[in-house]
Image (cartoon, rainbow, N blue to C red):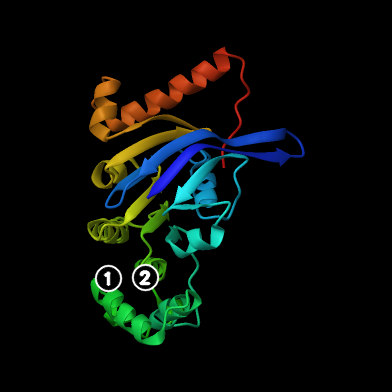
Amino acid sequence: MIEVNDLSKSFEDLKRGSVTALERVSFDVQPGEIFGLLGPNGAGKTTCLRIMSTVLKPTSGRAVIAGYDVVDHPEEVRANIGFMSGNTGIYDRMTAWEMVEYYGRLYGIDEPTLQSRLDDIFAVLQMEEIRDLLGSKMSTGMKQKVSIARTIVHDPPVLIFDEPTSGLDVLVARAVLQAIEYLKGQGKCIIFSTHIMREVEKLCDRVAVIHKGRILDSGTVEELEARHNQPDMEELFFELIHRHDHELVAGGVGIAEGV
C-alpha cells in the first residue's frame, strides 16, 4: 500500500548552501498496519510525510501510495490519503458537522453517500453532542475529533498522522490514539509520526528510528530491542542517535538538521 525507496530531499539555504533533509529513506507499510516514524524534532519526519502527501517533491527516490507515484500521479495520491497533523486549524464560524461536510464535498462525494458517511463518522467518534457546536466554542479535544473526522470523511485507504497528539493533555491524547487504533482495525494503512516513546510502544506494529534525515534502524519494538541488546526503547532510541552523531563527527561530516 505504501512503498518508499531511497527517498531524498535537499533544500537550498542562502547561508549554508544545499541542506539535506532526507537521505535515502526506504520503508513499506501494509494495510491494517501502523508504521511509526520515531525521531526528535528536526529529524526529517515532516519532510518525508509532506513528500508522501504531494506537498513537496523529492530530490531523488520514489514514493508510491496506493499504487500511485507521488510525482507522476499527485491527484490520485491525494484522493487516496488522509493527512492530519497536531496543528490542523479548525474554522471558528463553522459547526463540526458543517466542517466535515464541507471537506466531503471538496472530495466530490455525492450527497446521499456523504450524509450517510457523516452519520457513521459522528457515531463512531462519539461526536453527536458537538454536531452543531461552532469551532470557536470547541475544546482542544473536540477540535481533534473534528480533525480526525475530516481526515477520514472520504474513506481513504492510507492515513498519515504527523504528531497528532502534540500539545494535548493525556486524556485528549488517549482519545486520539484510540481513534487511530480503531482505524487500524478497519484495515487502514497508517503512518504515525511521533517523538513520544510510549505512543510507539502502545500503537505501532513496526517503527523506524529517523534522525537528521536518515533511518537508523527499523523493525518491531521487540526486534529493535533484541538487535541492540537494549530492553528499554527509550534508552535504545538515545543510544542510536548518540552513536549516529558520534560517527558523523568522527568522520568529519557536517551535520545538517532535518525538517
Q: Nearer the viewer, residue 246 or 223?
A: 223
User: Would residue 219 appear left or right of 147 to someone viewing this image?
Assistant: left
The three-letter code of the residue at mark 1 reads: Leu
Circles 2, 1 touching at the beta carbon (< 8 Å) = yes
Q: Nearer the viewer, residue 153 or 148?
A: 153
User: Would residue 66 appear left or right of 8 to someone viewing this image?
Assistant: left
Who's the residue at 61% across and 31% down the image? Answer: 256
The three-letter code of the residue at mark 2 reads: Ala
Query: Label 1, on which residue?
Result: 125
Q: Position of residue 132 (x, y in %)?
A: 37, 86
Q: Position of residue 239 (x, y in %)?
A: 38, 23
In the image, residue 145 above or below residue 134: above
Query: Label 2, on which residue?
Result: 149
Who's the residue at 76% across and 36% down the image? Answer: 15
Q: Position of residue 35 (x, y in %)?
A: 34, 44
User: Would residue 154 appear left or right of 91 to someone viewing this image?
Assistant: left
Tell me the number on the disc at residue 153. Answer: none
